[in-house]
Amino acid sequence: MAGRAAVPEVIWARPERTGRGPKPAFTRAGIAAAAVRIADAEGLDGVSMRHVAAALGCGTMSLYNYVPRKEDLYELMVDAVGAEHEMFEPTGDWRADMLRNAEETRAIMYRHTWVPRLMAGVHGFSPNTLRYLEHCLACLEPLDVPAGTKTELIALLNGIVATYTANDIATVERTRSMPWSEEEENAVRMAYLGSQVATGAYPRLAAAFGEQSGPVDLNAVFRRALERVLDAFDPALR
């Protein structure tokens, strides 16, 4: 495969384009933008080197001169959407700032529903991601804990955001594939659940469900999860 290295390497340590010839016709930013557009429209499975090359108007083998591997293409994509983070001036309230960062990350994932699938450590050291991590650490300056603890906090918050958002996205995508409405699906499932709880075989579940006064506010549940993580790291609450 053209341009593929025989040893591990980081795409960011490579020049924009390898090989000889005229001035490069494409940039990483342009390649990433094309891939992001495809992923937004068709999902991550729609992203291929051939598809991206066609969107750019070049041959697949030519694209390998710029991006040696599909994994490198994923890194470019994650970095591209990372630029959407607002690097605001920290307010001095580390909890409020980190909640703001988490909510913004969630919004980015909703705009680009394929992002949670790529939330792995290997994609966590691109230029825009590093800028975001530096921004988070600036927001956490008032928190009197070791730097390693701060990075752990950032990772936990990002993990919660990715997990909750991925579940939301999966639910929406599943609903779209069904021949009936989400309301009809939920009604049937809740009826079955109610019939099972009513047998008396699940007294603890019955008690828990009995405390529910109405539909669950998923946004409120998400916010409480974030708050509980922040509580765990807040020296004032220990």
Image (spheres, rainbow, N blue to C red):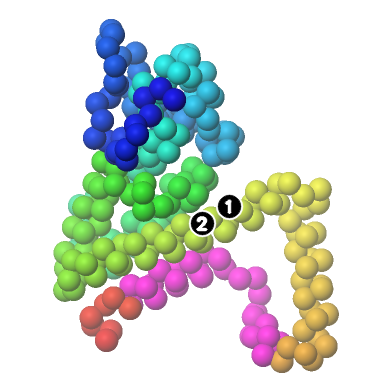
Q: Where is residue 237 in the image (x, y as percent from the top left)?
A: 28, 84
Label 2 – label 1 distance at C-alpha: 6 Å
Verify CB contact (< 8 Å) between mark 2 and mark 1. Answer: yes
**Residue, x 42% and y 32% (percent of image)?**
69
151 lies above or below 17: below
Q: Nearer the viewer, residue 66 or 164?
A: 66
Q: Label 2, secondary structure: give it.
A: helix
Q: In which quarter of the image is residue 78?
A: top left
On whether residue 128 falls in the magenta region, the answer is no
Badge number at residue 169 = 1
Image point (48%, 19%), residue name? 60
- The quadrant of the picture occupied by the N terminus is top left
**Residue type at the position of mark 1:** Ile
Residue 49 at what x, y percent from top left? 49, 27
Rendered location of residue 209, percent (x, y): 67, 82
Q: For the residue marked with disc 2, what is the amino acid?
A: Thr
Label 2 packing within 10 angstroms: few (<14), some (14-19), many (20+): many
Q: Which residue is drawn at 29% across and 16% down?
A: 19
Where does residue 125 sit, x and y in percent of width and height? 29, 47
Q: Mark 2 points at which residue?
A: 165
Q: Which residues are the magenta region?
A: 204-231
Specify whether 174 is left or right of 47: right
Image quadrant where one finds the C terminus: bottom left
Residue projecting furthest to the top: 22
